[in-house]
């Protein structure tokens, strides 16, 4: 049972590559949309009823693992405090950008692997990359600083643990991901 004196957990999007790079929702989203794509391959162009000996179940085959995507809209509002919301937007921009363009280290020539979390009893951790980021600035201070914005973030699930181990970023796996998994969170 929820009581008003319980701490409200906030949705967070954090980097698995750079531990301190995390965006915490100022206001929790009113909804999360999670879509799951199950890829099917059509076997034969002839209708099943015309193929002798084939069953209708043989028409399609799943040829790869299903993938999920998530879409979330975040509201950042600094209007009441006359506070710029640029720092939050800058963090989202950093999470969705290549870490170090031209780096000799392969793991730095890509955007961040991320994790989305929201409380301990809510949605399970979603390991992902940011597929797209759309920012709508709505209110401004007299000096032009943005005071209110909505950011729509589209994320694509990835099997981060395997990718991080392959790229040699084991310390992040041990410090960030393992405690999340061992704290009772369910894995996808």
Image: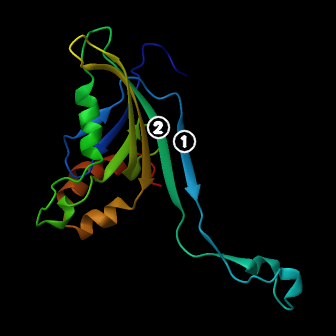
Place of residue 67 in the rendered image (x, y in percent of width and height, measured from the top left): 51, 60
Residue at 77% from the left image edge and 77% from the top image edge:
57
Q: Does any portion of residue 169 appear in the rendered image?
A: no
Residue at 81% from the left image edge and 87% from the top image edge:
54
Q: Which residue is mark 2?
A: 72
Horizontal side of 85 relative to 130 (left or right) equals: left
Place of residue 14 in the rendered image (x, y in percent of width and height, measured from the top left): 29, 42
Mark toward the start of the polypeptide (2 vs 1): 1
Residue at 19% from the left image edge and 48% from the top image edge:
18
Place of residue 78 in the rendered image (x, y in percent of width and height, measured from the top left): 30, 16
Q: Which residue is mark 1?
A: 33
Q: Label 2 to label 1, Cα distance in Å?
A: 7 Å
Q: Is residue 37 above or below residue 90?
A: below
The answer to whether mark 2 and mark 1 are in CB contact below 8 A is: yes
Label 2 neighbourhood size at 10 Å, few (<14), some (14-19), many (20+)?
A: some
Screen quadrant of the N terminus: top right
SS at mark 1 in the image: strand
Which label is found at residue 105? Answer: none
Report which quarter residue 48 is drawn in. Answer: bottom right
Q: Is residue 28 above or below residue 179?
A: above
Label 1 neighbourhood size at 10 Å, few (<14), some (14-19), many (20+)?
A: few
Place of residue 143 in the rendered image (x, y in percent of width and height, measured from the top left): 20, 14
Q: Nearer the viewer, residue 82 or 141?
A: 141
Q: Is residue 149 above or below residue 135?
A: above
């Amino acid at each position: 049972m929820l009581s008003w004196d319980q701490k409200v957990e906030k949705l967070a999007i954090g980097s698995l590559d750079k531990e301190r790079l995390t965006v915490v929702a100022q206001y929790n989203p009113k909804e999360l949309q999670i879509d799951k794509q199950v890829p099917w391959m059509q076997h034969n162009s002839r209708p099943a009823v015309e193929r002798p000996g084939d069953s209708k179940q043989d028409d399609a085959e799943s040829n790869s693992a299903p993938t999920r995507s998530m879409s979330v809209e975040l509201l950042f509002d600094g209007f009441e405090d006359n506070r710029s919301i640029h720092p939050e937007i800058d963090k989202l921009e950093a999470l969705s950008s290549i870490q170090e363009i031209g780096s000799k280290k392969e793991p730095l020539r890509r955007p961040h692997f991320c994790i989305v979390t929201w409380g301990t009893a809510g949605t399970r951790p979603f390991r992902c990359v940011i597929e797209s980021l759309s920012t709508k600035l709505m209110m401004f201070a007299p000096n032009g600083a943005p005071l209110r914005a909505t950011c729509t973030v589209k994320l694509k699930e990835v099997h981060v643990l395997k990718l991080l181990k392959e790229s040699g970023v084991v310390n992040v796996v041990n410090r960030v991901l393992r405690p999340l998994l061992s704290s009772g969170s369910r894995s996808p």
